[in-house]
Image: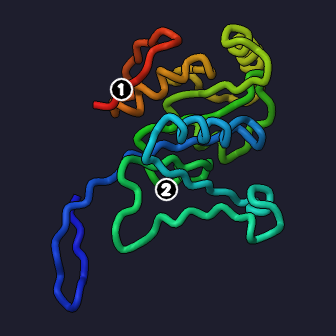
């Protein structure tokens, strides 16, 4: 991508390499979005995260000093590797390289913004506090069977914490997420290209 920068009344052409963008959305509050973002940040050195929320007070508390606003907008690019953006409405305006929708394995409420983001998601990440991957997927299948909304989950790969290496592998290699991903054994380590 080409960009131009004005410096001392002279326009300089510069090449800008856009970092990879991973979007993490969720059915509603408390479905594991921030937990997943933190896990991804631990596994992706050099990456940054941005949290978008309409209820800012819920994220940072009522004390402005407790706010965790990222300092990513400067004259020079700060994000070199990639950025993880947490929030549903982001996908209304920007196409992410990879979009992950988070949901509790037992289902729950689905916000209107999540319904829109679901259509643009590549993975459905089921979070659970105690169930195994098999149990979590069975719980979600039961939730889907009882669902009164017409939602299309057909193209989504449904994953759990146990499938985290698959998610990392997809991010590292910049794969076309519409294609099937070969799962790694539980102890596999994803390497950068």
**Colour pattern of the rendering:** rainbow
Quarter holding the C terminus is top left
Nearer mark to the viewer, of 1 and 2: 1
Q: Which residue is mark 1?
A: 191
Residue 61 is drawn in which quadrant?
bottom right
Q: Quadrant of residue 138?
A: top right
Q: Which of marks 2 and 1 precedes in the sequence?
A: 2
- Name which residue lies at 58% across and 20% down: 158
Label 1: which secondary element: loop
Q: Classify 146 as above or below 4.
A: above
Is label 2 in a helix, a strand or a loop? helix
Residue 94: x and y in percent read 46, 53
The residue carrying mark 2 is 93
Q: Residue at x 74, y 28 (%)?
A: 104
Disc 1 crowd rating (10 Å Cα; few below 14, some 14-19, many 20+) is few
- Measured as percent of width and height from the top left, residue 117 is found at 58, 42
- Separation (CA) of disc 1 from disc 2: 31 Å
- Name the residue at 40% across, 17% down: 180
- From what the image shows, is residue 141 above or below residue 70? above
């Amino acid at each position: 991508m080409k960009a131009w920068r004005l410096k001392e009344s002279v326009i300089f052409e510069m090449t800008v390499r856009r970092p990879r963008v991973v979007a993490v959305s969720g059915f509603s509050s408390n479905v594991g979005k921030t937990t997943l973002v933190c896990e991804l940040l631990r596994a992706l050195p050099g990456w940054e995260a941005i949290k978008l929320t309409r209820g800012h007070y819920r994220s940072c508390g009522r004390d402005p000093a407790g706010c965790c606003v990222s300092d990513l907008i400067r004259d020079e690019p700060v994000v070199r590797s990639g950025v993880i953006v947490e929030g549903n409405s982001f996908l209304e305006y920007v196409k992410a390289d990879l979009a992950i929708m988070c949901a509790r394995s037992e289902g729950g409420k689905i916000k209107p913004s999540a319904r829109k983001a679901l259509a643009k998601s590549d993975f459905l990440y089921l979070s659970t506090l105690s169930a195994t991957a098999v149990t979590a997927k069975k719980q979600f299948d039961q939730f889907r069977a009882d669902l009164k909304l017409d939602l299309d989950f057909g193209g989504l790969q449904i994953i759990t914490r146990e499938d985290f290496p698959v998610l990392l592998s997809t991010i590292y290699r910049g794969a076309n997420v519409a294609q099937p991903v070969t799962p790694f054994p539980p102890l596999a380590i994803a390497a950068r290209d």
